[in-house]
Amino acid sequence: MVGTSVVGVLVGQALDPLGQRMAEASRAADELRRAQAEAAGTEGDPTEPPSGEGAPELPHLLPAGPSPARRAGSALATGILFGAAAVRFGADLELAPFLVFFALLVVISVTDLTHRLVPRRLIYGALALIVPLLVATSAVDHSWRGLAGSAVAGAVSFGLLFAVWWFVPRGMGYGDVRLAGAIGLTVGYLSLLHAYVALLAGFVVGALAGAIAIVASSAGRRTRIPFAPSLATGAVVAVLGGGALARHLFHAGA
């Protein structure tokens, strides 16, 4: 566990500036597309609406650009999550995809808190590692049931958040939709109930964060709150304790 945590600290330190550079590049590309669309008299890419357009935003909750304090916090958070994952999965190949997943959740949360962006290249890059690792785990365990759950949970999670984004496009960014799909695909490998807990916990955390922001500041109901950290928190809760939570929820409901 200690060794895995140390690796997590090093990974977190390396990914934080990478995430900042990707977010800045994505912001510049979005602004260029909007300028070109305005010049051409078109609306631009419908899957990349201007962040916060039509809705006020909270001030950025973390400093953007080079920040030793933020980088240290990212490294610490990644190290803690790596250690928790090592305890959860032990010395098993199944640990590998979830280490990549936890590293993704930290860096994505930070970019959303600093830039109001969830860079697609971070998600796609992580999935390029996670999917083969999940396939390898299934092959080693001679069980393909987890991959079926991944496919179903990934599609359903993406579809649900896409529906929310479609009807309320200023309530969240399309990056949150992509992130939800990645969460469903990864957490769904454990079970569909784990994926359900991930989304449920994410929305509960998001609602609480929104309520706190409204009470603690002058933010109104239409103020856009970064949602990726809430989704990430829900995913962590589901991976580390989703089985027990699902049993409690369904037993209580019964």
Image: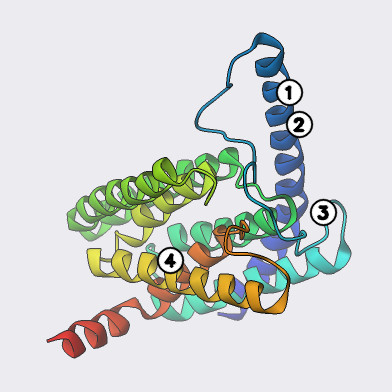
Task: Tell me which label, 1 or 3, sits earlier in the chain.
Answer: 1
Q: Which image quarter holds the C terminus?
A: bottom left
Q: Is residue 94 above or below residue 243?
A: above
Q: Is residue 230 visible?
A: yes
Q: CA distance from mark 4 to mark 1?
A: 40 Å
Q: CA distance from mark 3 to mark 4?
A: 31 Å
Give the left or right position of residue 4, taking residue 141 as reference.
right
Q: Which residue is mark 1?
A: 32
CB contact under 8 Å: marks 1 and 3: no
Disc 2, SS: helix
CB contact under 8 Å: marks 4 and 1: no
Disc 1, SS: helix
CB contact under 8 Å: marks 2 and 1: yes
Q: Nearer the viewer, mark 1 or mark 3?
A: 1
Q: Which residue is mark 3?
A: 64
* Local crowd size for mark 2, using a 10 Å CA cut-off: few (<14), some (14–19), many (≥20): few
Disc 4, SS: helix
* Local crowd size for mark 3, using a 10 Å CA cut-off: few (<14), some (14–19), many (≥20): some
Task: Tell me which label, 2 or 3, sits earlier in the chain.
Answer: 2
Q: Amino acid at mark 1?
A: Leu
Residue under the point 74% across and 55% down? 114
Towards the viewer: 63 or 223? 223
Q: CA distance from mark 2 to mark 3?
A: 14 Å
Q: Amino acid at mark 3?
A: Ala
Q: Is residue 97 above or below residue 4?
A: above
Q: Which residue is mark 4?
A: 95
Q: Amino acid at mark 2?
A: Ala
Q: Is residue 154 above or below residue 75?
A: above
Disc 3, SS: loop
Residue under the point 62% across and 60% down? 109
